[in-house]
Image: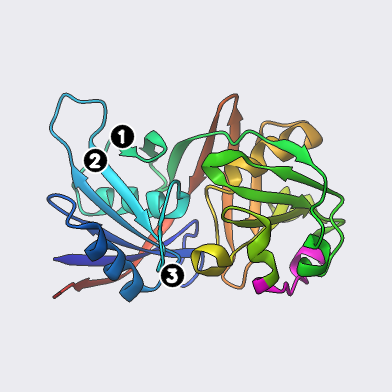
Amino acid sequence: MKIRIVDAFTDRPFGGNPAGVLLLDAFPADDWLQRVAAEVNLSETAFAHPLPTGGGADWALRWFTPTTEVDLCGHATLATAHVLRSTGTTDTAVHFTTRSGVLTSAAHDDGSHTLDFPTAPLTEVSVPAGVAEALGAEPLAAFDTGPQVGDLLVELADEKTVRALTPDLRALVAHSKRGIIATAVAQDPTRGYDFVSRCFFPRVGIDEDPVTGSAHTALAPHWAPRLGRDDLTGLQASARSGLVRTALRGDRTLLTGHAVTVIEGELLA
């Protein structure tokens, strides 16, 4: 069967966040899906199969890290939508049924896609003991992102501090269901982004995720009231880097980005 590696939230190869994508006729056993994801060894591998017409969704979609299945993933959803369009499977909006409900991807003439995701409910919490030491930086504030995202979002003093983080990943495991989102306002908004972030998910086998769409469902409601605009652009300042355009729409957050297929091959197992 065909397997593809797609760089998501970037318009050029070797940037953004790579995801494996497999289009199937049906989902095989869970242990096979997990073994494939471990073999691909990217932050997520997406598995999708078409659904009968007339239902509430067009495709069933699941996401696996190298060690576990996850409830929500932005970049692998974008990668799947890109594959469906680039292979001519569909050129319209796609509705995916997932662990997080029905998610929609709309294609645009410039090659980008917009994902319609649930907005993460933010609850301010005290900075947990040990987080500052694990990150190597003192948070200004901390927020629980709710069960669907499952991260601890921490706001740091400035962009320079976010970029310079070298966290103790083993220590971070104790502080959230999935991981830590570290963020700060952009030092210079004229450079094309409004805020920066980095995401560390050692609990699910991902030390640092290059670009995290699901994290932006929490970053959008965090920064929109602070910056006075519902439409913002986030830069995830990982080594690969990537841009996510966000649009806060109440209980939904729209995430827009490009994607590029970099590898196509045959899975023989």
Which segment did they paint magenta? 160-170
Give the quarter of the image for residue 160.
bottom right
Mark 1: few, some, or many residues within 10 Å (few <14, many ≥20)?
many
Give percent across and percent down for residue 114: 45, 40
The reply to whether callout 1 and callout 2 are in contact (CB within 8 Å) is yes
Q: Residue at x 82, y 63 (%)?
A: 132
Q: Is residue 243 magenta?
A: no
Q: Earlier in the sequence, mark 3 or mark 1?
A: 3
Local secondary structure at mark 1: strand
**Could you say where residue 253 lies in the image, as x and y percent from the top left?**
55, 34
Residue 95: numbered disc: 1
**Comes first in the chain, label 3 or label 2:** 3
Residue 13: which disc? 3
Q: Is residue 206 positioned above or below 217 on the image?
A: below
Q: Amino acid at mark 3?
A: Pro
Location of mark 2 (residue): 59
Q: Residues within 10 Å of mark 3 (few under 14, many from 20)?
A: some
Q: Position of residue 76 (x, y in %)?
A: 40, 55
Please tell me whether mark 2 sits on a helix, a strand or a loop: strand
What whole-number distance in Å separates the C-alpha atoms at marks 3 and 1? 26 Å
Q: Is residue 62 visible?
A: yes
Q: Position of residue 242 (x, y in %)?
A: 57, 60
Q: Specify the quadrant of the image occupied by residue 176.
A: bottom right
Q: Quadrant of residue 130?
A: bottom right
Disc ID at residue 203: none
> Looking at the picture, does residue 68 appear above or below residue 164?
above
Q: Locate residue 267 relative to residue 192 in the image: left or right.
A: left
